[in-house]
């Protein structure tokens, strides 16, 4: 079973399909991945703890690579994946629409953006936040 099926109330309502269509069944619709970028001095653990409290998420799980660290947590209605890089150029090399100069990427996976989500990110990160992309969510096994 796909991880997003466990998001209570977080499924996107399906469009009606013609009879006999081979398109996806009801409940197969995926939530959206909504991408945000920011340049912040805050530590990853501090950001994740604040996000956990703000959105009622369980504790984040952390992992690291040579020049970046990331963390993720899934709740009833949303999932957050937070990446912090050592520099302000790495994320823009991964993501074509990402604003330049960011060291944080936050990916919200949900049926829609929660009220005041971006404003809450601004407060938590202590920095301006840019929403720069939205895509159909991809399935996450373990990790980010």
Image: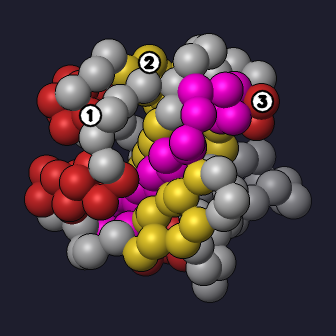
Do the CB atoms of the residues marked 3 and 1 lie less than 8 Å apart?
no
- Residue at 44% x, 65% y: name it: 72
Q: Residue at x 69, y 34 (%)?
A: 90
Between tags 2 and 1, which lies in front?
1
Q: Quadrant of the N terminus?
A: bottom right
Vertical relation: 113 (above or below) 89: below
- Disc 3 secondary structure class: helix
Which residue position holds label 3?
Answer: 93
The residue tagged with tag 1: helix, strand or loop? helix
Residue 88 located within the stretch drawn in magenta: yes
Residue that appears at 28% across and 40% down = 42
Q: Is residue 123 visible?
A: yes
Mark 2 residue element: strand
Residue occupied by mark 1: 125
Residue 124: percent from the left, percent from the top? 19, 37
| Badge 3 or badge 1: first in the primary sequence | 3
| Mark 3 or 2: the one toward you | 3
The total number of labels drawn is 3
Real-space Cα separation, disc 3 to disc 1, in angstroms: 22 Å
Decide which of 89, 54 is in the foreground and name it. 89
Q: Which residue is rendered at x = 32% and y = 16% of the image?
A: 128
Whether residue 117 sits left or right of residue 141 in the image: it is left
Q: Residue furthest bottom?
A: 1
- For disc 3, the neighbor class at 10 Å (few under 14, some 14 to 19, many from 20) is few
Find residue 130 and name its label: 2
**x%, y% of residue 84?**
49, 46
Magenta-highlighted residues: 73-92
The answer to whether residue 60 is magenta is: no
């Amino acid at each position: 079973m796909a991880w997003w099926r466990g998001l209570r109330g977080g499924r996107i309502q399906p469009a009606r399909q013609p009879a006999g269509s081979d398109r996806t069944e009801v409940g197969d619709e995926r939530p959206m991945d909504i991408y945000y970028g920011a340049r912040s001095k805050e530590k990853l653990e501090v950001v994740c703890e604040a996000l956990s409290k703000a959105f009622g998420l369980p504790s984040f799980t952390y992992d690291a690579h040579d020049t970046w660290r990331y963390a993720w947590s899934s709740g009833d209605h949303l999932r957050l994946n937070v990446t912090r890089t050592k520099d302000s150029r790495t994320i823009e090399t991964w993501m074509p629409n990402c604003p330049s100069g960011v060291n944080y990427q936050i990916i919200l996976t949900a049926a829609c953006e929660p009220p005041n989500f971006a404003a809450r990110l601004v407060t938590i990160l202590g920095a301006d936040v840019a929403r720069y992309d939205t895509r159909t969510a991809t399935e996450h096994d373990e990790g980010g």
